[in-house]
Amino acid sequence: TACDTVFEIAGVGDSESNAPNTIDSCEDYSIGTHRKDESIERMRVRSLDDGPLAVGKEVLVETIVYRAVNTTGRDDPNAQTMGHFFYTSDAHSRDWSYVNTTIVQVENTATVSQLVLSATFVLQPGNGTQAVRLSYGYGEYAIHNCHRIGSYFDVDDLVFEVDHDLIRYPGFTYFATAYGIPSTPPVWNTATYSSDYRVPRCKEYGTRCDTGSSLIAGSGDFESNSPNSFTTCADTPTGTGQRYESIDRIRVFSVNGEYMTSGSWAQIFANVRLPTEINRTIAEDYYHIAHFYHLSFVSGHNHWNYITSRFAKPDVEAAYFTAKFIL
C-alpha cells in the first residue's frame, strides 16, 4: 500500500547517503549547508484507498524538504524555490512524465524551515517497477526532470513495486482476494485500424483496449492513417514528426478490472509528446491543454460528451494525461 524512504535520502550532495539517489545520471549540486539550505529529506508514495499499489489507482507522493533559512547574498535573493514532481511507469526505461509543481516561498528567518510537498497522480500501465522523482531547487523555474541552473539543487527518486497480478487484473484481483470472489482472466485487446470507422478499433468485448505504441503515434503526415478520426475533425498539419505536439498512444480500461459495461467506470490514458522548444509567436508561458470527450453511440457521432481537461507546461518533452468517466 505504500513505500517510504524514511530518512535514507536525507541531505544533499556530500551530506546525503548514497548520493545522488537517482536511477539515472541526474545529480545534486549545492554549495549550501544541510538543514539551512534546500534539501530533500524523505519521500513516500501511498495509495489513496489504502489498498495495494495497482494500475489505475490514484496515489499520493509526499516529501519532506528543507527550504533556505536565509537567501541574503545569493545571486537573486528574491527568487522562489521550486519542487517539480515526475513519474515513470517503467523505472528501467527512465522515461519521466511531468506530474506537478509546488512553489515554495522563501522566508529569511533564523528558524529551521521544514515543509511537506505533495502531489497526486494515477499509476499507469508499464513495468512492475516504477518510480517517482522530486527535482527541487532555488530558482529552478524550468520544468525538467533534470535541469539545474542554480547552486542549490537536490534531486531524489523513490523506486516502488506495483504487483504484476494487479497490473494484469487492475483493481479486480485485490477485490477477489479480499472477498473470496473468483475472478476470471480479463481480455486485453489491442486495437487495429478499422477502414469502416477510419480509426483504431478493438473489436472484441474485454477489460482493456490499447492502440499500442505505433498505430496513432505522430500527427498529420507523420501519423499512420491520419487523422484517425471518424468525423471531419483533422490534425493541424504544422509540426515535424515527434518534435511538436502529438498523441502517441491511447489506452482505455475498466477501473474495477471487469468487462467494460454500460454504467461502469473507465480510465483513459493518453501518452502525448510536447515540443522540445518553442520558437513561435505564442507566449512561452502558455500551457498545453488536452480535452477529453466520450461518445456512447458511435453512429451519433455529433453528440460528444465532455469529460475533463488536463494541462502541461510546454517544456516537458513527453507526458501522459489521464481521466475517468462512466460508460
Image (spheres, rainbow, N blue to C red):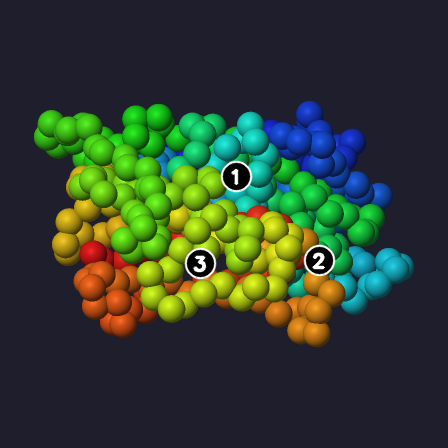
**Residue 292: where, in percent of width, then height?**
37, 62
Circle 3 — which element?
A: loop
Quickly name the residue at label 3.
Answer: 227
Q: State which quadrant residue 34 falls in.
A: top right
The residue lying toward the viewer, choosing from 134 and 212, is 212
Dot 2 crowding, Cα within 10 Å, few <14, some 14–19, many 20+: few
Label 3 close to label 2 by CB (< 8 Å): no
Instruction: State whether residue 5 appears in this view.
Output: no
Q: Which residue is mark 2?
A: 277
Using the numbered discs, state the Cα–Cα distance from disc 3 to disc 2 in whole angstroms.
24 Å
For image coordinates 50% across by 32% down, the residue present is: 90
Q: Which residue is mark 1?
A: 88
Q: Amino acid at mark 1?
A: Thr
156 to 320, vertically: above or below: above
Report the amino acid beneath label 3. Answer: Pro
| Residue 251, picture quadrant | top left
